Structure formats: structure tokens, C-alpha cells
Amino acid sequence: MEGSLLLPQFMVEIQDYDLIVIGGGAAGLMAAGVAAREGKRVALLEKMEKTGRKVRISGKGRGNITNARPAEEFASKIRSGAEFFQPAFAELNNHRTIRFFERIGVRMVIEQGNRVFPKSGKAWDVAQALVDWCRDKGVEVICDCRVEHITVLGGKVRGVQFRNARGFIRKIEAPAVVLATGGASYPATGSTGDGYELAHRLGHTIVPVRPALVPLVTSHPEARFMSGLLLRNIGAQLLVDGEVVQEEFGEFSFSPHRIDGAVVLRMSRRAVDALIDEKEVRIRLDLKPALDEATITARLEREMAEAEEELTIGELLRKVLPRELVVPVAKSAGLIAKHSSRELQGEKMERVVAALKCFELPITDYRPFEEAIVTAGGVSLDEIWPDTMESKLVSGLYFAGEVMDIDADTGGYNLQMAFSTGYLAGQLRRHTN
């Protein structure tokens, strides 16, 4: 056609490596660096223009790389895959991870909740140190390329086929591949679920993926009053079909379209699963967790008695609550905030106290993957050897990080799981019975 430029569809180039790592996030960088450190020829393929993008925004940009809790406490924070993760954690635990980063030039500090951050407060420093370490060990990093196929012959990995930034297809060979493409959360960082399709084509089962550590949506009729509110030191219970299934304590926040904060994120995995199963989900807040009902009643009665002028119910509640909660709590008790506090006698006072101790929010939805910190679901752990991270179905295929059906609470646990599984996968061990 006149005036058009015809480009070749294929440009095939075969080059041999000992290992190809697909995905340049926390798990992929760790796997690549470990293998290269042992003298392996390693190519790391990253579809974005830069590696470590998700690491660079972790911990709200401060880089919460791990959690320093003892091993048993650490394991209790893993929601899926705790037993599977044990061999990887034994190879690279949280304290070894801290020492590793300090050896490659990133000083670490332990903060509240045993969360570990770079002393600089910059997640960028963690990501850049990982990339520099990999390059120093001889890893060939190829960005702006999308892997389209993992080549397998006779049940063994042979290499990969990928499309580069110019649209040409290249083929490179290796007897081992680490699939570390991440999950589907924060897709702008490159985690768009590509690895699930690659694994599925090779016969692997994919446990249905859904957002985890994700804000939730409430249909509370007074939600508009609470927008912008941040609550600290709040007790909360997650109820599924009326049964308490989880209890948490900490921060809880409201915005126009969601509820958020550490409490919500930790509860979100169970809440999401229940919503998918079409169960009734509610969160019950204890707005005064340090006080029992009798103490709250005495406090309200004292405020009324000591007031120079007669208080409305709203004014009384304002003595013990943030402004944004006054109307919602009054309505939860079946009262009108503008009415006189003289009404609060007997059963009505009991209703107000009950609303303060058991303020319920109906949960009707969850926010999308774009707002999720991690992904639940992924490649079935039943098809991966936990002592090597190698596939049980394809020889030479290894997995690392969030592409597998593993996830944990917020607080550094998920990045540690990525580092540990990447560290183990990069050793390219073979399973022995």
C-alpha cells in the first residue's frame, strides 16, 4: 500500500542462558541476583520500562520491606500458604533479609509494629539497591519486553519467547525459568496477571484471583457524614452472616467511596471472599474500646449534670465522639441529634451506649485491583515443591512471589514472602524425595 511502512513481524534471535527470570519485581530481582551470584548466566525480562516499580511505592513510598516479629508470630500473619512458605522462610528469614539489605548499602530501622523500613524513609533506595546488586552480579536486565510463551519440550523448560519494545519477537533459551510476574494488584506497576496465563498454558491450576488488602465499600446511610474521618485505636469485628469471624484493633478511615485503614485492610481478605459467596458482611466498631458500658453511661450522665445549659443529644455525643460520628451514632440509636439529652433515660441511654460499643457498617462491595495492595489466589501451591519452588508439572520451571496463591497481612509480610521465595527459587534446586 502506497505510503505505508511494512515492518517485519518476527526477528528471532537465540541466545543461551542458565536462567531466565520473568518479572523484575521483588521476587524476580532476588531470584536473578541469587542465581547470578552463583555464577549462572541470567537474563531478567521486565515488561515495564523500569524494574522494581511496585517495590518503589511499597509502604506508602517508605519501603516496608519486612516485619521483625518472631517466626511463629510472622507465620500467624500469613493468610494463605503459611505452611508452604516455611522452607523459603528458613532459607531467608526476616532478620537475614535485614542483614542482606544492609550489606548492599541500605540501612534499616525497626518501627512500630516491628515494621522494617530503610533509614532514609525511601522505598526507591530499596529497589535501586536490588537492581544495582543484580547488575553487579552480572544479570542482564531487559526492560520493555512482554513474554508471550514459555517453551517446553518433553516436560522440560527450553526457553521463552517475548516481544520487545519495537514489536519484534525474540527467542532466548535456558534450561530454567523463574516466573515472578506478581499478581493483579496495582496494575499500573506492571502486575496485570500475565503470569497466570503463562502458567495455565503449561497445565497449572490457577486458584481464582481476587483483591486482598483492599479498601471496602459500605452502604451505611450516613456514610456521607463520616467522609474524611480517621479513627485511631478502634476495636473492630468482622461479621459474616451474623457470626464474628475476625477481630482487629487499630486505624480506621472513611472517604467518599470507601472505608480504609489497617483494620479494614486486614479484614478485607475474608470480607471479599464472603462477598463473592454472596454472604452478608458487616463490620462492628467499638468506638470506645477502653471503656465498658457502665463507665460510658457514668461519663454521659456526668456531662449532662455538669453542663451549664441543657444539651442536645448531638452536643452530648460531641463530648465523647468526633463531630463526623455524632449524627450517625444518634441515628444508630434510633434518636435525633437535635433533641434534648433529657430523653436519655433508661432504655434510650442503653441504646446510645450500645451504639458507641457496637456501631455497625454494612459492607456491600470491595474496591478494584487498582486499589489492592496484594492479590489473593494464583498458581496452586499443590503443584509447586515448597522446598525448591519448582513446578511439579514442568521440570525447570520455578515460581516466586505473588504469582502463587500466597498472601499475608499488611506490615511487610508480603514483601518478605516475595524475597524469601525468590531467594529459594534462584538457587535452582531440584526436588528430592
Image (cartoon, helix red, strand yellow):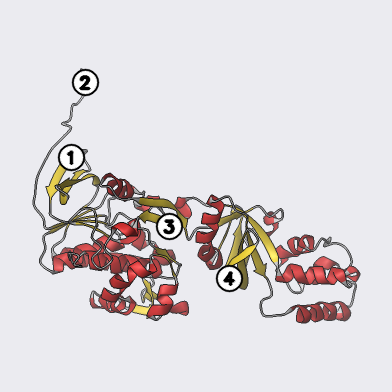
Q: Quadrant of the N terminus?
A: top left
Return the residue at label 4.
247
Foreground label between 2 and 1: 1
Which percent across, then down, holds residue 257? Answer: 59, 52
Mark found first going from the N terminus, 1 or 4? 1
Inspect the image, locate mark 2, and give the three-letter code of the amino acid beneath it. Gly
Q: In which quarter of the image is residue 280?
A: bottom right
Return the residue at label 3.
376
Horizontally, residue 120 falls left or right of residue 245, namely left
In the foreground, 402 or 166: 402
Q: Distance between the residues labelled 2 and 4?
A: 67 Å
In the foreground, 43 or 320: 43
Q: Determine the secondary structure under disc 3.
A: strand
How would you rate the neighbour count of disc 3 (Cα within 10 Å): few for under 14, some for 14-19, many for 20 or more? many
State whether residue 354 is above or below residue 180: below
Q: Residue 169 carries which label?
A: 1
Which percent across, then down, holds residue 103? Answer: 23, 77
Mark found first going from the N terminus, 3 or 1? 1
